[in-house]
Image (cartoon, rainbow, N blue to C red):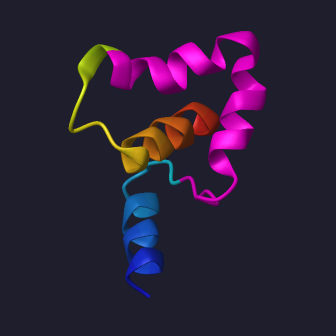
Amino acid sequence: MYREELAALAARRGWAVHRYDAKRVVDEATAHLGPVAVDVLDGVRDRLGPPWTKDHRTALAAAITAG
């Protein structure tokens, strides 16, 4: 319910809203990125370290697929 209301408010402001399936978005981003996918999706944790988590990786994948 809140998700729909926030999306409607964002749309009224002209903001783009993208929804994603958290279980599939990493696979979609991997397909989109091709051979650099491992470096992009996993390399961030190697470079930044904690607290980079699976949730951050999923959010990064969602941003890649939304673009």
Report the residue at 70% width, 30% height from top. 30
The furthest residue to the left: 51
User: What predominant SS class does the magenta segment belong to?
Assistant: helix
Report the residue at 73% width, 40% height from top. 28
Up/down of 66 relative to 38, above or below: below
Query: Which quarter of the image is occupied by the C terminus?
Result: top right
Report the residue at 44% width, 50% height from top. 14
Residue 11 x/y as whole percent: 46, 60
Q: Which residues are magenta?
A: 18-46
Left or right of 35? Residue 13 is: left
Report the residue at 25% width, 25% height from top. 49
Residue 8, image quadrant: bottom left
Up/down of 8 relative to 40, above or below: below
Residue 19, image quadrant: bottom right
Up/down of 6 relative to 47, above or below: below
Residue 44 x/y as whole percent: 38, 21
Residue 62 x/y as whole percent: 54, 43
**Residue 41 on the magenta span:** yes
Query: Which quarter of the image is occupied by the N terminus?
Result: bottom left
**Residue 60 on the magenta span:** no
Left or right of 38? Residue 4 is: left
Residue 6, image quadrant: bottom left
Number of marks present in the image shown: 0
Q: Nearer the viewer, residue 50 or 60?
A: 50
